[in-house]
Amino acid sequence: MNKKIPLAMAGLVAALILMVLGLSYRNQAAKLVQASLDNDLPAVERLLAEGMDINRQVSNGSTALMAAAHKGYLEVARRLIDAGADVNLKTQQGMTALMYASWKGYNGMVKLLLDNGADIDARDANGATALSGAAGEGHPEVAKTLLERGANIDSKADDGRTPLMTASYGGSLEMVKLLLEKGASADVSDKEGFTALMYAAVKGRTEVAGLLLEKGADVNARENSGGTALMLASHEGHTAVVKLLLDKGADASVAEKTGKTALSLASSKGHEAVTKLLQKRTPD
């Protein structure tokens, strides 16, 4: 059974790093980006008065508006938008100002960008949206705003992950509850067959897993290699999740394609508490 790698903030993190590394004072665009990062409105005004191209991008594609959005500087962002900043430009990784603001949890910035035409379902280079970023980082107020404005709640990234999967992995109970209340599908799977419950299980998110099960998540769903949420939790030694899944009807006797069971996975990793619990629940 393949062990699931951490979720989907890798593209966002990489984009942030490149935003910083891409700044170069050798060009005028970088000066405006830096002024925005510094929340230096007078410098922004001066550069605009000098005829700066407000939509000029630094080497990684970042703009002054993206910098302001990433830092949550509303006044700078308003000034840039008033001066003609394009709210939908993308970095080389496909990041937009709205994605930065959503990822960081700046609800006021998110509203400002949406009010000025930001594409709510724009996708980055990995197919993730602003809602995916807010979900993964646990910003329910931002997610609520995005959903109220029409964001696709079940949008899938290129690997098939949905905002609910991202939130389940991240562990924000409030976020998961919001998404489920707004109609997110609990049993959609990604390209590897992983469901939101599996994402919660692999990270030991007991409360999230419980909520997903309450909303009808299939406790015995199997991913492409035959693994289940119980196997994932057992492999990682998450005793509380294992107990929850067993109490909710998880089948401890099934094996994945390689023949491994929840018990053998827990035992091989030295998770004694999980092993003992499974031994009590596994038929001879």
Image: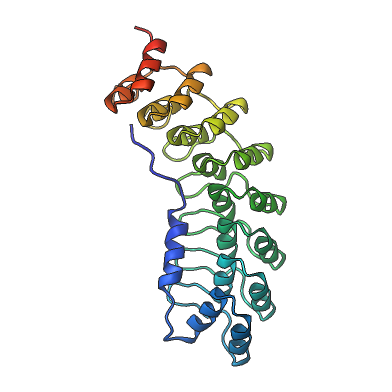
Q: Is residue 249 visible?
A: no
Q: Residue furthest front?
A: 273
- Residue closer to the observer: 76 or 66: 76
Percent across and percent down for residue 101 are 59, 61
Picture layout, residue 132 above or below residue 122? above
Q: Quadrant of residue 82?
A: bottom right
User: At x 58% / y 81%, what residue is drawn?
Assistant: 54
User: Residue furthest toward the bottom?
Assistant: 50
Question: Looking at the picture, how far across and down is residue 31, in whole percent?
Answer: 50, 83
Q: Quadrant of residue 256?
A: top left
Q: Position of residue 240 (x, y in %)?
A: 47, 25
Direction from residue 161 to residue 277 in the image, left or right: left
Q: Is residue 8 above or below residue 74?
A: above
Q: Which residue is farthest top?
A: 284
Q: Position of residue 79 (x, y in %)?
A: 67, 78
The quarter in which the N terminus is drawn is top left
* Residue at the (42%, 74%) spot, across then down: 22
Q: Does 16 sit above or below residue 279?
A: below
